[in-house]
Amino acid sequence: MSNRTEGKNRHFLILRIFRWALMITVPCLLIFSALNEDKNYGLLSILLIILAMVPFFLSFERRKPEARELVVIAVMAGIAALGRVAFAPIPHFKPTSAVVVITAMVFGPEAGFLTGAIAAITSNLFFGQGPWTPWQMFCWGMIGFAAGILRNIGWFKSNLRLAVFGFLTGFGFGWVMNIWYVIGFIEPITYQAIMAAYISSFWFDFTHALSTLIFLVLLARPWIKKLERVKTKFGILDSSKKL
Amino acid sequence: MNKAFASYHPAVSFSFFILILILSMLLMHPVLVGISLISACLFSWFLNGLKGLYLNFKFGLPMFLLVALANPLFNHRGKTVLFFFRDNPITLEATIYGLCSAASLVGIIVWFSCYNKVITSDKFLYIFAKVIPTIALLITMSIRMVYKLRVQLKMITAAQHAIGLAVGEGQVRQRIRRGMRMISILLSWSLEDGIETSDSMKARGYGLKNRSAFSLFKFSWRDGIVLGIIAGLGALCWAGYIAGYGVMRFYPALAPLKLSPPALGMYLCFFILALIPSLIELRENVKWHFYKSAI
């Protein structure tokens, strides 16, 4: 018996050392590589984007959320991801942002951020993970977070405002993703190259914005009603008092 | 079969993937990028067979073309002008850089597809359960949810079809309305289902103190040896990178390929590192072959 617990302790020790080693060495090496001569900004930008998301995840982690909150976010993220997979034949036409916005409008900024970020990871299992995954997590997470905050200050009173917000998120998503593309693959980065990247992405961003608008107009009211019902019935994620 | 590398301790496979992904992003050198891409494809072939490799290419090829074409079109730096495209010079240097970064990107995509095959949800939970338990659980649950939602959607489609409300029939307006109806059913069904799941989780003591996650992983000698080899080769590659052998100078003119002993040593280290999982699979396959023929 004592032998067994000892083995277990040793086991945990190995894991702990491994984790700390990984957590400390990886960022240090990356920062060092950025200061090194070749200036690998692509990798550094990914690291910074991940760091930018850490506070959101940690505050959720610290709060020790209920099982019900977890399940609701998992379901909404699953629906958002499935929507992206279902509409894959039409490029850049996806309901993901709309689902994230609706979730944020009912359950608040934190749930919105998590739904968006996790929908990005989950849907990329079907589209292929890559260095862009943290960027997409950040973009969709921020869309959810912004929608939640706007709801808290009472901005979504009319359908028109909601539609405008949906349309803008489509462009915002594309523009942030363009930054990643320019940093990651264009060398050297010039003003013309940045302009060219933004001009050539216009129609993709427009399709994304349009699809978000369409899905928001179609889905928002009935879904919000449904989600509000579930929220009151089971008393979940009532973060209306918090920012 | 073909699960040799996956049978190692998660710490081994996870650190391998972290290391190879970072190195693949960092090293911008035609030789090293080629090594990364080829060994990633080899491992993917071991894991998924030719079909998986084909899927990778179907996804990777458009991305390869997009990135490879973009750089020479947007950038006109470099000494050697190949030709003029709409009065803009297309240079050899920018073209080579585009090809290089495109190949590096496709290599990373293929490595990620291998990662998805090797690091299954239980391993992911095992690695992250102590650091970020809730987020790790959330990610795992949501991945599982996508598959569950698909099954539920199929059942809803069948039921709607049976009562004469198939989505594929009728006018456009009707179709849209029926489609909306289906998604709406899916939403309420999955949410109510989810609440039941969470109640069940709570009844089994989710979130209580001193709860541990079940796992069957044991760190044995062979894991330690492979982890040591990976760490050693990774350190050598890193040293080579710091010494400047990992990155080639593209502008203003292509630097000649370095073939000095340290540079060759770095290529060799990276080559062996990238081949480790494939070698493990190969060894297992050969062993299996001999066991079979011995019967």
Image: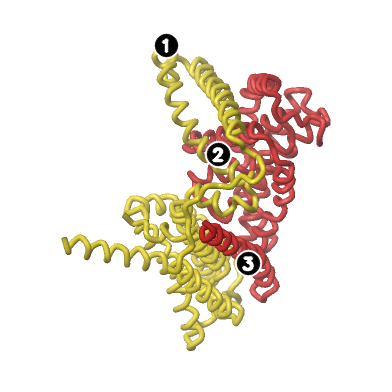
The residue to which callout 1 is attached is B163
Amino acid type indicated by mark 1: Ile
Quarter assignment of residue B189: top right
The residue to which callout 2 is attached is B141
Residue occupying image coordinates x 67% and y 47%: A138
Looking at the image, which is closer to me, A172 or A95? A95
Amino acid type indicated by mark 2: Met
Mark whose residue sits in front, 3 or 1:
3
Visual hue assigned to chain B: yellow
Q: Position of residue B290 (x, y in %)?
A: 22, 65
Q: Are marks 3 and 1 in contact (CB under 8 Å)?
A: no
Secondary structure under the numbered disc 1 in the rendered image? loop
The residue to which callout 3 is attached is A21
Tell me the quarter of the image containing the C terminus of chain B. Answer: bottom left
Q: Position of residue B71 (x, y in %)?
A: 56, 62
Residue occupying image coordinates x 50% and y 52%: B123
Mark 1 packing: few (<14 Cα in 10 Å), some, or many (20+)?
few
Looking at the image, which is closer to me, B253 or B3? B3
Amino acid type indicated by mark 3: Ala
Q: Is residue A95 visible?
A: no
Secondary structure under the numbered disc 2 in the rendered image? helix
Q: Is residue B66 visible?
A: yes
Q: Are marks 2 and 1 in contact (CB under 8 Å)?
A: no
